[in-house]
């Protein structure tokens, strides 16, 4: 893989193909469940696991950029991803994990970073950026549209499972209602804050519709995560007093409104599942269940290296070890996948708890615990480093920072940070925002054509 420094992107028609490829690969990763619902082969659900890595390699090999800062960011992202890959391979070697474990686990955790890497490796003109933005907006509106069709026309909420059947385009997916609602909330925030060329009433309507999808799908953890992420963003902005006060006022209003709604509106009554002080505390059932993974996993350590490298990729409570090895056992076992009794032990703790089937909020099978259990403290540290690079080099505004923080908080609840539909969407929005800033910076440069024309007009 190489990044070639050459002439301006306007003179390179190959870049047009790359921007279109990024859009097409995004769409194949966003709509597979919907396409399967339309009777496409079930294998289409795994197509993105091939296309996204291919897109990343192909883009890095073909792209031509001359921006030194852009090249520096791409190289640092590659370095961080390689460190994490090395840690994953070392953990697999220590624990005799299958090669397929390494490949699938790495892609589940890093596929979105590969897509983000492809997006930021392209020098997009405003025209190409507009087409990429239109692709994401189209997918986002489609998700909203189908959620409301499912609720008010198809009446899927009356089926077994209730509001959980309102999934947008993520039909038939485990926790699809949470994924669809998370995408909707992300889009509502992005559209409201960035579509400045659209009427205010339309931006407000889109934001309200996005919140409406969260409500009709009963994805209450999405609201909770958004509030916590907002508080963390507030803390990160404490050095900017004016901005911090603005965020604090908004947080108080939203928090107070949510508490009132939970007590007075049936649509928000689900939040009362969590508002039970007796289940928290050091001896509370929720605390004991959530932290059981940190007692169970170390009980299987047999080497001084296990705390540092974990029990192996897919061997504990990540998405691979927690669900996929069981759900796709016939396929993955034939490819040499390995399993570990630690996964079954944690599931046993879930089944033994009276809280185990009430909400994923209490589950010990959550993202950060899965990385720690599978790859140890070194794997956890190297994975955090990837996010640190994204935060420091690519998050140029509060929208992108907020999205990163939502992923961090989701990782403390369940397996959302390994859900391809949601994570690839978040990565695309972060990449889109970065490209938008790049285009704005170029437009403001004294060497840009538009700036030159304005300068000449003033003369």
Image: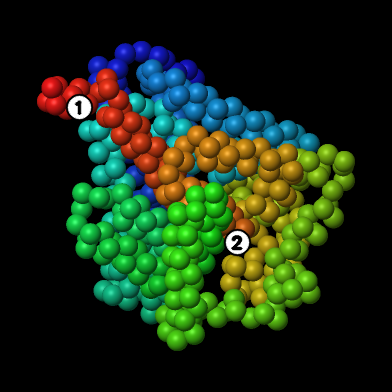
Q: Is residue 235 left or right of residue 59?
A: right
For the residue carrying disc 2, how many other residues have a C-alpha within 10 Å: few (<14), some (14-19), or many (20+)?
Answer: many
Picture quadrant where residue 250 is located:
bottom left
Residue 379 in the image: above or below residue 155 = above
Q: Residue at x 49, y 63 (%)?
A: 248
Per the model, the C-alpha gap separating discs 1 and 2 is 47 Å
Quadrant of image for the C terminus = top left
Residue named by callout 1 = 450
Q: Residue at x 40, y 72 (%)?
A: 215
Question: Could you tell me if residue 251 is visible in this image?
Answer: yes
Q: Residue at x 62, y 58 (%)?
A: 412
Which of marks 2 and 1 precedes in the sequence?
2
Residue named by callout 2 = 413
Q: Residue at x 38, y 76 (%)?
A: 157
Furthest residue to the bottom? 264
Q: Is residue 195 left or right of residue 94?
A: left
Q: Position of residue 180 (x, y in %)?
A: 41, 60
Give the numbered dot on residue 150: none
The residue closer to the viewer here, 1 or 327, is 1
Q: Position of residue 12 (x, y in %)?
A: 27, 18
Q: Position of residue 295 (x, y in %)?
A: 80, 60
The residue closer to the viewer here, 224 or 61, is 224
Question: Could you tell me if residue 17 is visible in this image?
Answer: no
Furthest residue to the top? 6
Q: Secondary structure at mark 1?
A: helix
Q: Secondary structure at mark 2?
A: loop
């Amino acid at each position: 893989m190489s990044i070639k420094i050459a002439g301006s992107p306007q003179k390179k028609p190959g870049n047009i193909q790359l921007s279109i490829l990024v859009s097409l690969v995004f769409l194949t990763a966003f709509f597979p469940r919907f396409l399967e619902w339309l009777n496409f082969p079930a294998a289409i659900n795994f197509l993105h696991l091939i296309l996204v890595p291919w897109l990343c390699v192909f883009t890095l090999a073909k792209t031509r950029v001359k921006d030194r800062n852009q090249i520096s960011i791409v190289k640092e992202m590659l370095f961080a991803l390689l460190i994490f890959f090395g840690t994953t391979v070392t953990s697999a070697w220590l624990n005799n994990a299958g090669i397929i474990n390494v490949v699938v686990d790495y892609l589940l955790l890093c596929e979105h970073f590969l897509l983000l890497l492809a997006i930021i490796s392209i020098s997009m003109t405003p025209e190409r950026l507009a087409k990429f933005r239109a692709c994401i907006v189209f997918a986002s509106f489609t998700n909203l549209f189908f959620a409301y069709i499912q609720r008010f026309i198809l009446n899927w909420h009356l089926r077994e499972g209730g509001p959980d059947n309102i999934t947008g385009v993520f039909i038939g997916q485990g926790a699809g209602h949470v994924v669809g609602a998370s995408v909707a909330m992300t889009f509502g925030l992005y559209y409201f804050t960035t579509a400045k060329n659209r009427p205010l009433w339309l931006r407000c309507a889109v934001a309200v519709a996005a919140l409406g999808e969260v409500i009709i799908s009963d994805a209450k953890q999405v609201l909770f995560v958004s509030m916590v992420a907002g508080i963390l963003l507030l803390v990160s902005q404490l050095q900017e007093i004016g901005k911090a006060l603005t965020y604090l006022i908004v947080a108080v209003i939203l928090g107070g409104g949510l508490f009132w709604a939970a007590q007075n509106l049936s649509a928000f009554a689900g939040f009362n599942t969590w508002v039970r002080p007796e289940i928290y505390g050091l001896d509370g059932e929720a605390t004991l269940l959530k932290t059981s993974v940190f007692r169970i996993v170390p009980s299987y350590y047999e080497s001084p290296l296990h705390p540092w490298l974990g029990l192996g990729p897919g061997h504990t409570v990540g998405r691979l070890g927690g669900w996929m090895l069981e759900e796709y056992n016939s396929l993955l076992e034939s490819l040499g996948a390995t399993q570990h009794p630690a996964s079954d032990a944690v599931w046993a703790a879930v089944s033994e708890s009276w809280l185990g089937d009430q909400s994923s909020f209490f589950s010990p099978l959550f993202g950060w615990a899965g990385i720690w259990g599978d790859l140890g403290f070194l794997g956890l540290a190297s994975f955090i480093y990837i996010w640190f690079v994204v935060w420091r080099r690519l998050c140029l505004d509060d929208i992108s920072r907020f999205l990163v923080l939502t992923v961090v908080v989701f990782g403390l609840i369940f397996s959302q940070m390994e859900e391809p539909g949601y994570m690839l969407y978040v990565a695309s929005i972060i990449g889109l925002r970065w490209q938008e800033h790049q285009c704005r910076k170029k437009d403001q440069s004294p060497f840009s054509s538009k700036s030159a024309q304005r300068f000449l007009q003033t003369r």
